[in-house]
Amino acid sequence: MSSKKLFSVGAAFGIVLLIGAAGGFLLALRWQDGGTARSADKLSHAFRLVEKNYVEAVDSEHVVERGIEGMLDELDPHSAYISAAKMKQVRESFNAEFEGIGISYEFARGPDGRDTIAVLSVLSGGPSEEVGLLPGDRIVEVADSSAIGFTSAEVQKSLKGPKGSEVTVTVRRPGRPEQLDFTIERDEIPLTTLSAAYMVDDSTGYIKVNRFARTTYREFTEALSKLKGKGMERLMLDLRNNTGGYMSQAVRLADAFLRDSEEIVVQKSRHDRYDDQYEAESGGGWEQQPLMVLVDQQSASASEIVAGALQDHDRALLVGRRTFGKGLVQKQFELPDESVVRLTIARYYTPTGRLIQTDYASGDQQDYLEEKRNRFEYDATHTVSEIIARAPDSLVYRTKHGRRVLGGGGILPDVLVAPDTSATFVQAVRSRNVPEHFARQWIDTHREARTRWEGRRKAFFRTFEVDPEMYDDFLAMAQERGLRLASSSRPSGGPDSARVFSQRQAQAHRAYLSTRIKGRIARRLFGQSALYPVINDVDPLFQEARRHWPRARRLARVGPGAGDVLGRVQPTTPSNEQAAGGALDSKQ
């Protein structure tokens, strides 16, 4: 954004922890007052006492790390200490690339009862595809050493590596008696942040953003351009389960939908160097066309910046569930060993001044999450109008054209879709991940499916069906994984009856679960992007959203000075000035 910088860098962290080669502990401060100096002295003195007098040898590094964690626990739920090893993984995720062999994998139970590395998908054009690795292959050796029983950390350590380096893997391929060896040259592997982008119908486009990383805006604009070329007239942006990421990418994404100079977010702190505000520029890719945004309780941080800005400007219709409510800005301060202190430096405000951060008492995680659970249950039994009517006046705000919206913890959507609590059989099946396991087994035992459907993705979507025999096999697997089905039409009573389901219940959800199975098979045949065109057909929230395009179209017609198009314009209430702000983190 040319008009506003994305992050003030400012002065270094006021407290720097240094661990010397001899394990000594030095606390150097930029002294602010006598009280700060005395507190630092006390901390340093306590550590020296422990190190010199404790009955056993002290792991200085571990003690220091726990001390940092304890200090941050007293602040807020999102300030945190991140070890050097963990930070390496975080950087890869948000840089949207790493160096490796180009596969996604999962663990599958091997014949000896220990896990094997099962190739879930192979990156198109990546090094593994080039040598002939296939989805479904089981990696049993890496560099002539057994990989059976590997942990996730061991997989990462053995398969990732510098670009240009080589690794030899031995695989067991279903349907082949002999093991196969592949020597793979590692390369840069992109991590996409768009899970799917496709045309729902002749005029409706769908884009799902799973997180905000360095490449998100570029990926989004490329997908938007392709969908526009296919005749898209209205867009559904899915931010469900998107827990955030780079604030700069959220700002740029919101800018694509807003008009020149419209405010996106304001960042405020007790330190002037961290205060900032961000405005849209002209030339966004989708400034006037109908727009719908799907959100849920896992939409957080950067996702809430986008949702809040679009709702406040009456630019999009929000559908789903109240968002997580994370409105704290974190800045990362690197320590000498490349570990990081992620410290809250500011809060953010939506354009109307709403507080999005859920209230918290210090860093008490348990109370913080309990409050969110209570709010989720409350929302499930009330309408949007009821929730706003019962809220304190200080938390009720007016959008650009007078619609009432709510602050005080998360973004309350315009259309609230409660979860279906009646489908307990479906919940039991999904909690055991049965559709995923069944799809993997089906692909392993139907190797001809890859040849049959290769290059025929649309035909698969149109004609593939889970027949009754296949569904019975699925139910058999569900029972193998601990789900109990009664032989009669209704389960018998008894202490375990809540965990036993009838055949009638199983058959009642056949259409829904069959579609979930089909989606998982599609993902294994065609990649991650093939999942959503299938499962969205039975996704209750997605289907409910499609009913509300008339409201989204009315919002799209609202322009500067468009007055009463929404039919409920009222002046902004003074209560807006009484509310405190919200905030966001730059990385999550």
Image (cartoon, rainbow, N blue to C red):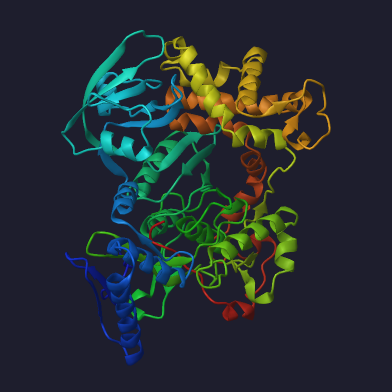
Name the side, left or right, on which 287 lies relative to 473.
left
Q: Furthest-top residue in view?
A: 177
> Which residue is pictured at 29% across the width and 43% down the height?
97
Q: On the image, which quarter does residue 248 sit in?
A: bottom left
Name the side, left or right, on which 519 lies relative to 65.
right
> Which residue is pictured at 34% across the width and 77% down the height?
46
Marks counted in the figure total 0
> Which residue is pictured at 55% across the width and 64% down the height?
312
Name the side, left or right, on which 542 lies relative to 205.
right
Work out which quarter of the rendered image holds the N terminus and state it: bottom left
Above-or-below relation of 262 to 145: below
Name the side, left or right, on which 429 lies relative to 284.
right
Q: Furthest-front residue in view?
A: 55
Work out which quarter of the rendered image holds the C terminus and state it: bottom left
Give x and y (percent) for residue 255: 42, 57
Give x and y (percent) for residue 580: 54, 77
Give x and y (percent) for residue 382: 75, 57
Q: On the image, which quarter does residue 302 sit in?
A: bottom left
Q: Nearer the viewer, residue 184 or 517?
A: 184
Q: Is residue 502 visible?
A: yes
Q: Nearer the viewer, residue 251 or 91?
A: 91
Give x and y (percent) for residue 547: 67, 42
Q: On the image, which quarter does residue 132 sit in?
A: top left
Q: Is residue 191 visible?
A: no
